[in-house]
Amino acid sequence: MRRFLLLYATQRGQAKAIAEEICEQAMAHGFSADLHCMSESEKYNLKTETAPLVVVVSTTGTGDPPDTARKFVKEIQDKTLPPDVFAHLRYGLLGLGDSEYTFFCNGGKVIDKRLQELGAQHFYDTGHADDCVGLELVVEPWIAGLWAALTKHFGSSRGREEMSGALPEAPSASLRTEPVQPELLHIESQVRHLRLDDSRGRDSEGSKQNAVSSAQSGALIEGLEATLTRSVPPLSQASLNIPASPPEYLQVHLLESAGKEESQSSVPSADPVFRVPISKAVQLTRNDAVKTTLLLELDISKTNFSYQPGDAFNVVCPNNGPEVQNLLERLELADKREHRVLLSLKADTKKKGAALPPHVPESRSLQFIFTWCLEIRAVPKKAFLRALVDCTSDGAEKRRLQELCSKQGAADYSRLVRDASACLLDLLVAFPSCRPPLGLVLEHLPKLQPRPYSCASSSLFHPGKLHFVFNIVEFVSSATTVVLRKGLCTGWLAAAVASFLQPNTQDAHADGGQGLAPQVRITPRTANSFHLPSDPSTPIIMVGPGTGVAPFIGFLQHRAKLQEQHPGGDFGATWLFFGCRHQERDYLFSDPWSLCSRAELEHFLKQGVLTQLKVSFSRGARAGEEEAPAKYVQDNLRLHSQQVARILLREGGCIYVCGDAKNMAKDVNDALVDIISKEVGVDKLEAMKTLATLKEEKRYLQDIWS
């Protein structure tokens, strides 16, 4: 059997699932995959590896390698390594990312670039899969082409051995098989468009999506359109290429409960967990604002939890109670919700490297596991849909599930499952004859992830306290019936503080005569570089519309205390570009509120802590103004292009951007390119290079989310 080394680095399980799919397919193609997580460095050695290497790696944050790759990246970045240390290595790499973020697929790109710098060569071209348009658009053809590339590699390896150990020159384009070429070229071209002209890139991608949609909608019958449960020609009449069913590997035993109370502390966590009370809660927006924004204060005084402005932390939250109940009822397990779950591996499983899911604790109840451990709202992957096919008795329902997991049904899957955020419960409601066993569900539902939030305070300014700000997320799920859902964590937090939530008053204390304050469990986030400059004389520009202003409140509080402690100190200029819809409804930190004696931003401006405050109102001008001079933060940046360019290019300043990745961050990036191009007198490509240099120097920093 022809062996290859298969490494994956994952943050939320996607890269692992794809690597496992490659491993499963390998046997059918006459290969043996030696599968390991990249963090398991004791199980492989690239310096002596003779087999070809296949790598699947995701990207986390705003362009970082996943936590499981940090050690690996640190080791290969060692500057003492000789430049030919991996000259013997032949590899193919699949990177996962999201083009809504500036550093698309950067986790894979960092590893790819460094391996080549150390002498390694491709036997198969790198793939960059985009979660923004659907990972499967690249993942599936990349895997399909991998087998031909491996076959060619093994076929030529004997010839290389006969050439006195000498390796032939790698062709400039590496090996590429026909099935994978169009998709890879398309994705790469889209990335280039996104970098050079974001609006053009979005239009191009949209055109591709529309083309796929048009191909289907062109065959509508009497006005019918495909739905989750119904397809239309040509898909409904097509022969389907359906993936093999993933092998089952979990054996589940349910034992009656011993009646013991279950603690949240048994939820597996790789990071230290701190249980802290919510001491205050304030609504920062008016009731007629489009979004409701809350500020919560956590009392961390009795813990050793520490942070600095710019840091983020995680909130451990449960699944929605009614959704858990509905899912257990649909799985016909509601009467066993208190039963303890014991897992073991099936003795006859064909799954290579099968292991018990580490996020499912031992001997906990079904209710506990479905509430605290499983991401029940996760969009089911195609492998899960394929497994559900075998659990479905109705012929029409079985056919539709086959279509959704097939190559031919990719467009329907993207639109009706992935883009619609359909979850397992939605599918089980839509396909009533589908009755998956508990073991299958536990195999495919990923870990319930804690939700990250930016710190909105300084421990110098508020000792023993931690503030954070969030919008209560609301969205319509229309996978089956139209349902209004709240964000998992924001909805839970809002309900927890509802009894003592106050609108901008001095009495937003959690006790408030209501008894004990609710508690939440938090974990620290991996250290990042989104911090104030070590030299306080460095000027800074902060761009944060909406709740993106949160970390900058911490910055300004911290700077205020430093200036108070060092009255004669040299402190650089501070510019804040803030934006919201309406001045009267959602201008955050502008009105008196319980955690500050006066309007926060205006107060910092009067103190001189904040040098310039530039506010944009997208839905209304300031009082007394007929028209807003700048609707969005990027417009205000352009209005002050000379000052922005001076701070960044002449004074060695830093710029921080926090908020929405999908539109704002890209629009701000485009504005900065235009500003540099205009003020320096260079073309856009040269301006982009200048901006890239600022990023490399950690002077252009982002804390963005989608």
Image (cartoon, rainbow, N blue to C red):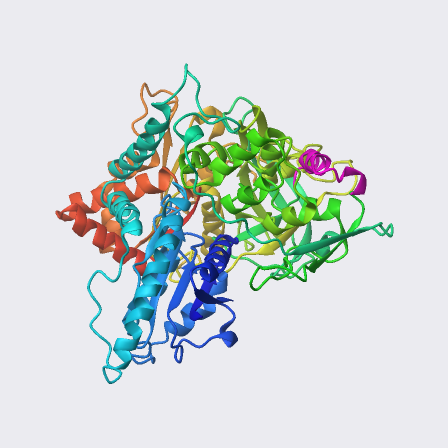
Residue located 50% across and 63% down the image: 68
- Is residue 104 something that shows in the picture? no
In the rendered view of the protein, which quadrant contains the N terminus? bottom left
Asked whether residue 96 is drawn in magenta, I would say no
Q: Is residue 292 visible?
A: yes
Q: Residue furthest bottom?
A: 164
**Residue for point 14% across, 47% down:** 683
Q: Residue 53 is drawn in which quadrant? A: bottom left
Q: Is residue 324 magenta?
A: yes
**Measured from the top left, where is residue 391 in percent x and y?**
63, 40
Please state if 506 lies on the left or on the right of 222 as rendered: right
Q: Position of residue 439 (x, y in %)?
A: 67, 50
Q: Is residue 420 above or below residue 243?
A: above
Query: Magenta span: helix, strand or loop, mainly?
Result: helix
Compared with 699, 495 (above or below) is: above
* Residue at the spot 73% in from the left edge and 35% down from the top edge: 329
Front one among 426 and 10: 426
Chain part drawn in magenta? 319-336
Depth check: 130 or 560 in front? 130
Residue farthest right in this picture:
259
Q: Quadrant of the C terminus?
A: top left
Q: Residue 51 or 570: which is nearer the viewer? A: 51
**Above-or-below relation of 354 to 99:** below
Q: Residue 166: x, y in percent?
A: 24, 81
Q: Residue 644: where, in percent of width, then height?
A: 26, 46
Left or right, residue 132 beside residue 521: left
Residue nearest the observer in this picture, 366 or 625 = 366
Q: Is residue 211 left or right of residue 432?
A: left
